[in-house]
Image (tube, grey):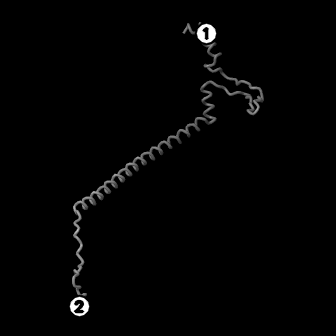
Amino acid sequence: MTGDPAPMPGRLRLWVAPPIPVRAPRAAFATAIIAVVLIGVVGILLVNTKTVEQSFRLDALRQEKATLDQREHDLKRQIVDASGPGKLHAAAKRLGLVQAEKPAVVWLPNGEIVGMPVPGKGPTAPTTDDGLRKDLTPSAAAGR
C-alpha cells in the first residue's frame, strides 16, 4: 500500500489547487510610499525651519529685554540721584526758594496743624508776584 486511498467508483478525485496569482500594482504602491516619505521629510524641514526662525526671534527679544532692563536700571538710578536731599536743595536754590526757619507739621489722621509756620528769610525770587511788581512797573518797562 502506498498510502493513497483507493478511488471509489463513480467519484472524482479532489486535488488542492494552487492559489490564484495576485498581481499587486507594484508601481503605484512604490509611488505612494515615496510620496509619504517625501511629505514627511518636507514636513520635518518646515517644522525645523520654523523652530530656528522662532529661536532667532526669541534671541532678539532677549537682547532687547536686556537693553531695556539696563535702561530701566539707569533711569531708576537717575531718579534716585535727582531726588536726593542735596539735589533737591540745590534745585530749590536755583529756583530762588529759601528754607523755612520753622515749618509747621500737619498730622494727617485728624488734620491738626502743629506749630506755626514762619517763612524763610532771603532774597525774593524774581518770579514771585511781589518781585515782578517792584522790577517791572509800567514806567520802568517803558524806559527799557
Image position, residue 86 (x, y; %)? 62, 34
Q: Residue at the bottom extreme?
A: 1
Label 2 secondary element: loop
20 to 12, vertically: above or below:
above
Q: Which residue is mark 2?
A: 2
120 to 54, vertically: above or below:
above
The residue sitting at 32% across, 57% down in the picture is 40
Of 24 and 138, which appears nearest the observer? 24
Left or right, 65 with respect to 45, comes to right
**Image quadrant in which you'd find residue 28:** bottom left
* Quadrant where the C terminus is found in the figure: top right
* Quadrant where the N terminus is found in the figure: bottom left
The residue sitting at 23% across, 76% down in the picture is 17
61 to 144, vertically: above or below:
below
Q: Which of the two marks, 2 or 1, is nearer to us in this view?
A: 2
Q: Which residue is mark 1?
A: 137
Q: CA distance from mark 2 to mark 1?
A: 150 Å
Specify the label residue 23 is tagged with.
none
Of 95 and 73, which appears nearest the observer? 73
Query: What kind of residue is marked 1?
Result: Thr
